[in-house]
Image: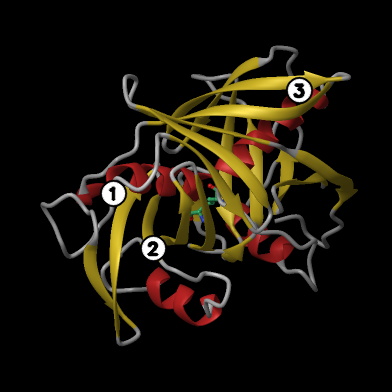
Amino acid sequence: MKFTKMQGLGNDYVYINGFIEKIGNPAELAVKISDRHFGIGSDGLILINPSSVADFEMEMYNADGSRGEMCGNGIRCVAKYVYDYGLIDKTQISVETLSGIKYLVLTVENQKVVQVRVDMGKPELKPDRIPILAEGETVINVPIEVDGREYKMTGVSMGNPHVVIYMDDIQHLDIERIGPKFENHECFPNRINTEFVKVLDRNTVEMRVWERGSGETLACGTGACAVAVACVLGGLTEEKITVRLLGGDLFIEWDWEKDTVYMTGPAEVVFDGEWKEEKDV
Ligand SMILES: N[C@H](CCC[C@H](N)C(=O)O)C(=O)O
């Protein structure tokens, strides 16, 4: 089975061309190939498939085999893959995801995609998209007790669920301890992606993320969008911000007139390879 390893700000996935390769059990394959010692090593698996409603379909799995409704860094790499590998020659494309069709604008230099701007869609603030105990109220600075300590969380769904936690110091955060306790908290029956954020000024924040199904990643596109929405709702930043992640910067804009969030960032190929499995799953 041929694959391409790609990364968006260090959030790395194995990409498979679903027009050519047929994967019997993608969830099982995601677990196998994501292992950084016994597999290829990645934050998960992304299949690029035909679609009857868009140019392509993105089918995304976390490293634990769970399906993600959307993946911001992943969809930018999908755009780079389909253009650079000749599946399409347009610089405006559409990609079907579990959280609807996304529209992307590709920046090309020397016949290669170097940057992608994604219309990430409308942020959902209603608890029914973020299953939490505080049903019925918009989830802004709602208290939650985790590991014996109270935090204030703001819930935002970008098709996948996020909670944003503000902190004065994220550098020394014991994310390996606290991350899983948020991820698996009883408040979140579908588990949760958690962003830990320090606001630097009205146009800049820094964040770390513990991702549902993958643990700490170097970047999270949907998470950066959720953070921007939370910060604007909390009156902490302007609608256009730079989100500084461990893997680099994303540029996020919440367009209030259109009520949609735009994310702009890079996408890169790491290498092409072949996965030799006794029996392809
Ligand atoms: N772990 C996420 C999916 C990947 C999101 C992230 N890698 C991104 O770039 O948006 C979830 O289970 O909802």
Compared across the picture, whether 145 is left or right of 122 comes to left
Residue 1 visible (yes or no): yes
Q: Residue at x 49, y 19 (%)?
A: 53
Question: Which residue has dot 1 on it?
Answer: 234
* Residue 252 position within the rendered picture, expressed as x and y whole percent measured from the top left: 51, 36
Q: CB atoms at circles 2 and 3 under 8 Å apart?
A: no
Q: Is residue 226 left or right of residue 35?
A: left
Disc 2 residue crowd, few under 14, some 14–19, many 20+, Cα 10 Å: many
Asked whether mark 2 lies closer than 8 Å to ligand 1, one says: no
Identity of the amino acid at label 1? Gly
Estimate the x, y position of residue 143 in percent, counting from the top left.
Answer: 22, 69
Residue furthest out toward the left: 136
Of circles 2 and 3, which is in front? 2
Q: CA distance from mark 1 to mark 2?
A: 11 Å
Residue 208 percent coordinates (x, y): 54, 62
Disc 3 target residue = 83
Q: According to the image, what is the colour scheme of the structure?
A: secondary structure
Q: Which residue is mark 2?
A: 166
Quick check: 275 left or right of 168? right
Residue, far front: 201
How far, Cα to Cα, is label 2 from label 3?
38 Å
Q: Secondary structure at mark 2?
A: strand
Q: Nearer the viewer, mark 1 or mark 3?
A: 1
Where does the C terminus fall, quadrant-wise?
bottom right
Q: Are marks 1 and 2 in contact (CB under 8 Å)?
A: yes
